[in-house]
Image (cartoon, rainbow, N blue to C red):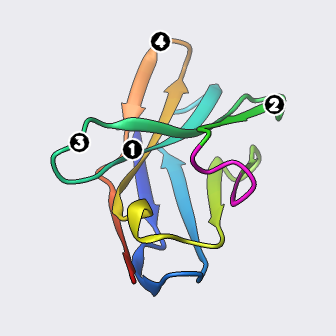
Amino acid sequence: QVQLVESGGGLVQAGGSLRLSCAASGRIFSINDMAWYRQAPGNQRELVARITNGGNTNYADSVKGRFTISRDNAKKMVYLQMNSLKPEDTAVYYCNALINYNLDQWGKGTLVTVSA
């Protein structure tokens, strides 16, 4: 049915950049907030960035000024541009969206590894 599929993760050196993408598919007539979360080994999942369907954004303090969230409503996509990456950004990154008003949907995640 409804799916979120992330892509764009990988291995990058500290100071480098990556762009994550997340595509929503299935029987969708509305997508409200979209967000990126991450979970590092041994840590709880944490919010990285959120964007409303009107384009308002908020970020975790740890990524402000380095990461940018954006979305393309027509394509049902959300993106996360990550610059100046640090080893502590290493985590599995998950896409999340509120779909059809009451479906809190998650992707399966994409691994980002930042080497020192």
Query: Residue 7 versus residue 89: which sits nearer the camera?
Result: 89
Give the mark nearest the N terminus, 1 or 2. Answer: 1
Mark 3 burial class by Cα count in 10 Å: few <14, some 14-19, many 20+? few
Q: Position of residue 33 (x, y in %)?
A: 63, 27
The spot of residue 54 in percent (x, y) is: 84, 28
Mark 4 vs 2, N-terminal side: 2
**Part of the protein shown in magenta:** 62-68
Q: Earlier in the sequence, mark 4 or mark 3?
A: 3
The amino acid beneath tag 1 is: Gln
Which residue is disc 1 drawn over?
A: 3
Is residue 60 placed above or below 31 in the rendered structure?
Answer: below
Label 3, label 1: how far apart the Cα atoms are: 25 Å
Give the answer, above or below, for where 13 lies relative to 73: below
Residue at label 2? 56
Gap in angstroms between the C-alphas marked 2 and 3: 27 Å
Q: Amino acid at mark 3?
A: Asn
